[in-house]
Amino acid sequence: MLSILDLFSIEKPVWPMETICATIGCSAPTAYRYLRDLVDAGLLARLGNGSYTLGPRVMTLDYQLRTVDPFFSMGHSLMRELSEQTGCDCVMTRMFDEEIVDTHRESASGGLDLAYGRGRPRPLFLGSAPKVILATLPRARLKRLFEKRAIEIRDAGMGETFEEFWRGLQKISKEGYYVSRGELEAQMASIGVPLFSSGPQATAALALVTSLQRFEFMDHGKLLKQLQATAQQIAAAVADHTIGAH
């Protein structure tokens, strides 16, 4: 039933019941029951023409998530400061299972018109943020990921074989950062570092994003030091928050 929520997107925010039935492959009575339950829960809202869109509970849950997420609550002010210092957009990205999502962005004056905003799933193998997170994952998990998504990995230029994929991520892990030029968006560049809360596996990343043209004239070493310092401050604050919660 909850998979119905995955149908709604920026490109298609409204769905007629008949189209939902055909897409998820269920009978009209079953779809009606699912939709009624989702409307009752506030996750969907019924429109007058027999179509559905996301409901008010989704906005409430988004607010609650921002309130309780320690990375956001501990990091947003530090991200704003870093954005002001560098003139870049500062983006926090989280990995949930095999899904990569930007959870917060602080923009410099004017900001950037980025294709992927808060909450919109991103490609798993393009850009600096996903790669610095993937580089911290254990070999066994990456092997399973390669077996499931080898075509995407090859298309992203991350390796024809698992060993190539693994070696590339090990290089990123050793360096502790990754620079992306035009991978996710043709005219954009980013530099990303992993964000740790506990243990050796990152569940988030912090990145600075700017135009590719501007990035090439910036002091990359200084930019990296500023980014790493902010990431360390956020990680320390999250760790203190976690300890204090016990």
Image: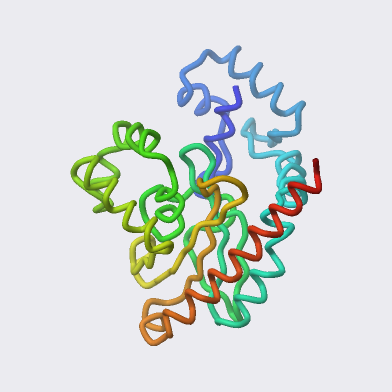
Residue at (36, 38) in percent of width and height: 139
Q: Nearer the viewer, residue 43 or 198?
A: 198
Residue at (63, 18) in percent of width and height: 32
Q: Nearer the viewer, residue 220 or 198?
A: 198
Give x and y (percent) for residue 1: 60, 22
Please indicate whether residue 246 sits to the left or right of residue 238 in the image: right
Please indicate whether residue 202 sits to the left or right of residue 61 in the image: left
Give x and y (percent) for residue 65: 72, 46
Q: Is residue 51 above or below residue 160?
A: above
Q: Is residue 42 above or below residue 115?
A: above
Give x and y (percent) for residue 28: 56, 15
Q: Nearer the viewer, residue 238 or 8?
A: 238
Q: Quadrant of the C terminus?
A: top right
Please indicate whether residue 187 sits to the left or right of residue 228 in the image: left
Give x and y (percent) for residue 73: 74, 57
- Numbered marks: total: 0
Please indicate whether residue 141 sits to the left or right of residue 200 in the image: left
Q: Is residue 71 above or below residue 178?
A: above
Q: Is residue 41 above or below residue 87?
A: above
